[in-house]
Image (cartoon, helix red, strand yellow):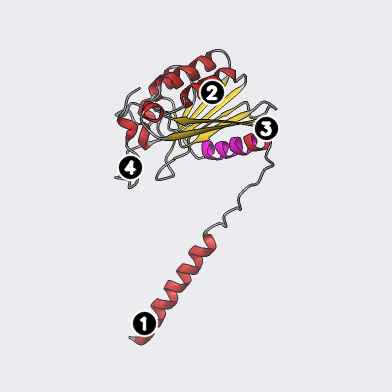
């Protein structure tokens, strides 16, 4: 019995060591010089949606979107208009929070011909950002707590930060977006959506609010 226990303990130790070796070391944080211009909007006192719409309208080449909740019809219309004027618009969405049973704008984006992919690897794909013209000197990135929903605009305490004039920062966000896009599932119609996951702890709930 004692020998069996030692054997079991040895196996558990070996499995633990193997799991630790298999886990890739995490990269340190990235540091960038502080430069450029910073634009802030705090809801409900400011209008983050208006700031985002202005940035969308100013984009000339590329808009990359990454969203957890996306129900804002004005923002969807802004992206569709950008797409129609020749801007390359691509959207990444959290799969669970943008299903057909929600008020997600995914059908609007798909109908306009905007490429959409959904993230399924994570419990929550919680990034909320838009990247504008990342390959140019005037590129910008908008990020913060702000979900792309009406609730975030009029009822929640949120923030949006738009960083301009710092190309290395914008490129870093664009590279991270590409990393997520590479492992996301392309959705060409609502029928391409993956099967619904089991109940997830900690998921936000203001997806039920239509805009």
Residue closest to the eye, 33 or 122: 33
* Sooner in the amino-acid sequence: mark 1 or mark 4: 1
Mark 4 or 2, nearer chain start:
2
Label 1: how many residues lie within 10 Å, few (<14), some (14-19) or many (20+)?
A: few
Task: Classify mark 3: helix, strand or loop.
Answer: loop
Observer-side mark, 2 or 3, equals 3
Sequence-first tag of 3 and 1: 1
Q: Nearer the viewer, residue 142 or 110?
A: 142
Asked which secondary structure carries label 4, the reply is loop
Residue 155: x %, y % from top left:
35, 30
Marks 2 & 3, CB-CB < 8 Å contact: no
Indicate the secondary structure of the residue bearing disc 1.
Answer: helix
At label 3, counting other C-alpha atoms closer than 10 Å, the crowd grade (few under 14, some 14-19, many 20 or more) is: few
Q: Quadrant of residue 33?
A: top right
Quarter occupied by the C terminus: top left
Question: How far apart are labels 3 and 1 at the CA level?
Answer: 65 Å
Left or right position of 19 against 71: right
Tell me if label 4 and label 3 are in contact, CB under 8 Å.
no
> With 65 as the anchor, is 34 left or right in this view?
right
Query: In 3D space, how far apart are the residues under numbered discs 2 and 1 (Cα atoms)?
Result: 61 Å
Category of crowding for the residue at label 4, using alpha-carbon neighbours closer than 10 angstroms: few (below 14), some (14–19), many (at least 20): few
Percent position of residue 62, x then y: 59, 24
Q: Earlier in the sequence, mark 2 or mark 3?
A: 3
Q: Write down the residue under mark 2.
A: 89
Quadrant in which the N terminus is drawn: bottom left
């Amino acid at each position: 019995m004692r020998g069996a226990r030692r054997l079991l303990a040895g196996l558990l130790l070996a499995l633990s060591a193997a799991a630790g070796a298999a886990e890739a070391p995490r990269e340190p944080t990235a540091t960038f010089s502080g430069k450029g211009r910073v634009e802030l909007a705090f809801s409900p006192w400011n209008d983050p949606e208006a700031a985002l719409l202005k940035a969308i309208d100013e984009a000339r080449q590329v808009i990359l979107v990454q969203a957890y909740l996306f129900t804002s019809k004005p923002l969807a219309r802004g992206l569709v208009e950008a797409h129609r004027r020749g801007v390359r618009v691509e959207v990444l969405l959290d799969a669970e929070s943008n299903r057909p049973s929600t008020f997600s704008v995914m059908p609007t984006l798909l109908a306009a011909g905007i490429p959409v992919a959904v993230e399924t690897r994570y419990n929550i794909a919680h990034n909320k950002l838009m990247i504008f013209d990342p390959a140019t000197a005037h590129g910008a990135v908008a990020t913060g707590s702000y979900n792309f929903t009406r609730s975030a605009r009029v009822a929640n305490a949120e923030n949006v930060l738009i960083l301009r004039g710092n190309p290395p920062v914008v490129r870093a966000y664009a590279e991270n977006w590409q990393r997520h896009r590479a492992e996301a599932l392309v959705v060409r119609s609502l029928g391409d959506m993956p099967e619904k996951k089991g109940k997830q702890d900690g998921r936000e709930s203001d997806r039920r609010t239509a805009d």
